[in-house]
């Protein structure tokens, strides 16, 4: 069967959009579960009613997000088999096990304790309920570990051999703890926590701006921003460490991310300039124009002034990744990371000078608006970070071993259009529905009328 040239492009764009629609949900599930545990723990320690109200309020948002993540996650796994069946067949003995580990040790584990966390109020003791919430935190983090492990193995495949075109695991420890996972997983977990903290901060800042339960939400805003001073700073450091891993294990991907076309200058000296902005020519062999800072690329990637950094000219033309998407996606992600760090420092400064008392915080309207705006930026950072990671790996589906074109299902153009339309319609339906209900809960605010729950012993 002769395929239309557009089928390959549609398959790639289709799966890119499917994963992009899914990845906005799990990070909030993972990070917000930890914040729910913290809020419930503070309630038990202080017996302050507002901690209970905050926990129950954000738990509603957690539930909506959790459901949307499950729905789009199932769709994404379905898309693997439909759009990339040869890849699923070849990598099934490895990825099938990793995703199976995630299902057994994380998803089913989490689903059970989510039920206790959501429906256990009034029915189990407060200590047991806190234990259930803690297990949701552990299970969601385990889920992130297994999913990132599977993706990281595609970036740096180790511990396998190929038999008749099928990947067979020869050392499961090397498969699971491949080089990329050791830095990619902490980077993703920190991204989840950073997104969730800014989500809480943004919702809280909006409530303060509207003078709705301002005292309660000012406390949540303060705690979130103080935590973000540390989390956002550590994230920048871990992100830099991941960059070093990419430079070592995927030099072509690093060259694409940096728009680094030539290893050496025309005079033979190492090309150490870092491109702030650039645009490649038609065949990705050079930049049409660029704005560069001398020596900075070498400092970033080798920690020296003038050591060489491998450029795209060291790779065959058919093994070079696209440049525009990873180059600009990476810069957007990094810029957002630094911006969020400075927003957290702004919050720290206001706290130090005593501006977090409610009557004074309500006057900091530009700061509050900035925090509300910043709540959307971690989503964009995760999107652009994921696009950087996936596009820079091209043309490989399993780096250096299996090309994306080899893993794609043979499909007619009408069939590809049908699946594309179906997946997009479902993803957009979930997105609109999740946003509608999240916005509705935020507008309604916390339930201040119901009495504080009692446990089975009748204790407050």
Image (tube, rainbow, N blue to C red):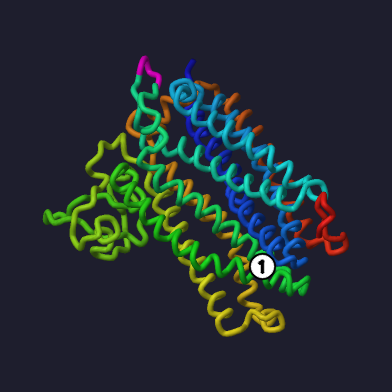
Name the image quarter holding residue 90: top left
Residue 81 point in image, percent of width and height: 55, 25
Q: In this view, does 240 lie above or below 136?
A: below
Q: Which residue is pictured at 49% across the width and 24% down the height?
A: 88
Q: In this view, does 112 lie to the left or right of 96?
A: right
Q: Which residue is pictured at 56% across the width and 25% down the height?
A: 82
Q: In this view, does 67 lie above or below 343?
A: above
Residue 194 point in image, percent of width and height: 54, 58
Q: On the image, numbered disc 1 is attached to which residue?
A: 220
Q: Which residue lies furthest to the front in this view?
A: 457
Residue 230 point in image, percent of width and height: 49, 65
Closest to the observer, 381 or 151: 151
Q: In this view, does 354 lie above or below 405?
A: below
Instruction: Quarter of the image for the C terminus: give it.
Output: bottom right
| Residue 425 visible in the displayed image | no
112 part of magenta stretch = no
| Residue 205 visible in the displayed image | yes
Give the residues drawn in magenta, as a range: 163-167
Q: Is residue 282 above or below residue 278?
A: above
Magenta portion: prevailing SS class: strand
């Amino acid at each position: 069967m002769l395929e239309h040239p557009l089928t390959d492009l549609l398959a790639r764009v289709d799966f890119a959009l499917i994963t992009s629609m899914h990845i906005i949900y799990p990070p909030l599930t993972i990070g917000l579960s930890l914040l729910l545990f913290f809020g419930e723990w503070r309630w038990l320690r202080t017996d302050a009613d507002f901690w209970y109200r905050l926990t129950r309020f954000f738990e509603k948002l957690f539930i909506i997000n959790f459901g949307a993540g499950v729905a789009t996650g199932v769709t994404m796994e379905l898309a693997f088999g439909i759009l990339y069946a040869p890849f699923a067949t070849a990598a099934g003995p490895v990825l099938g096990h990793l995703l199976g580990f995630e299902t057994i040790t994380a998803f089913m584990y989490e689903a059970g304790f989510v039920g206790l966390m959501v429906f256990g109020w009034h029915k189990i003791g407060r200590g047991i309920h806190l234990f259930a919430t803690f297990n949701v935190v552990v299970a969601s983090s385990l889920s992130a570990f297994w999913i990132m492990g599977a993706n990281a193995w595609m970036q740096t495949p180790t511990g396998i051999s190929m038999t008749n075109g099928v990947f067979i695991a020869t050392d499961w420890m090397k498969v699971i703890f491949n080089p990329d996972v050791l830095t990619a997983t902490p980077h993703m977990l920190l991204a989840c926590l950073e997104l969730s903290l800014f989500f809480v901060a943004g919702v809280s800042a909006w409530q303060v701006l509207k003078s709705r339960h301002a005292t309660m939400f000012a406390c949540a805003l303060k705690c979130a921003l103080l935590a973000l001073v540390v989390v956002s700073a550590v994230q920048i450091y871990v992100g830099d460490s991941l960059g070093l891993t990419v430079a070592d294990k995927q030099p072509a991907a690093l060259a694409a991310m940096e728009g680094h076309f030539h290893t050496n200058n025309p005079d033979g000296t190492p090309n150490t300039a870092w491109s702030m902005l650039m645009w490649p020519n038609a065949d990705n062999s050079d930049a049409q124009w660029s704005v560069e800072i001398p020596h900075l690329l070498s400092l970033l990637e080798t920690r020296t002034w003038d050591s060489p950094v491998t450029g795209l000219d060291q790779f065959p033309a058919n093994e070079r990744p696209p440049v525009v998407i990873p180059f600009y996606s990476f810069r957007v992600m990094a810029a957002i990371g630094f911006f969020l760090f400075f927003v957290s420092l702004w919050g720290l400064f206001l706290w130090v000078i005593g501006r977090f008392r409610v009557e004074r915080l309500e006057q900091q309207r530009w700061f509050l608006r900035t925090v509300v705006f910043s709540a959307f930026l971690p989503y964009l950072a995760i999107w652009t970070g994921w696009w950087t990671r996936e596009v820079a790996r091209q043309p490989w589906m399993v780096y250096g071993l299996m090309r994306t074109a080899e893993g794609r299902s043979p499909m007619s153009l009408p069939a590809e259009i049908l699946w594309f339309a179906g997946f997009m319609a479902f993803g957009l339906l979930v997105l609109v529905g999740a946003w509608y209900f999240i916005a509705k809960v935020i507008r309604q605010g916390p339930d201040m009328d119901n009495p504080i729950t009692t446990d089975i012993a009748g204790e407050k």
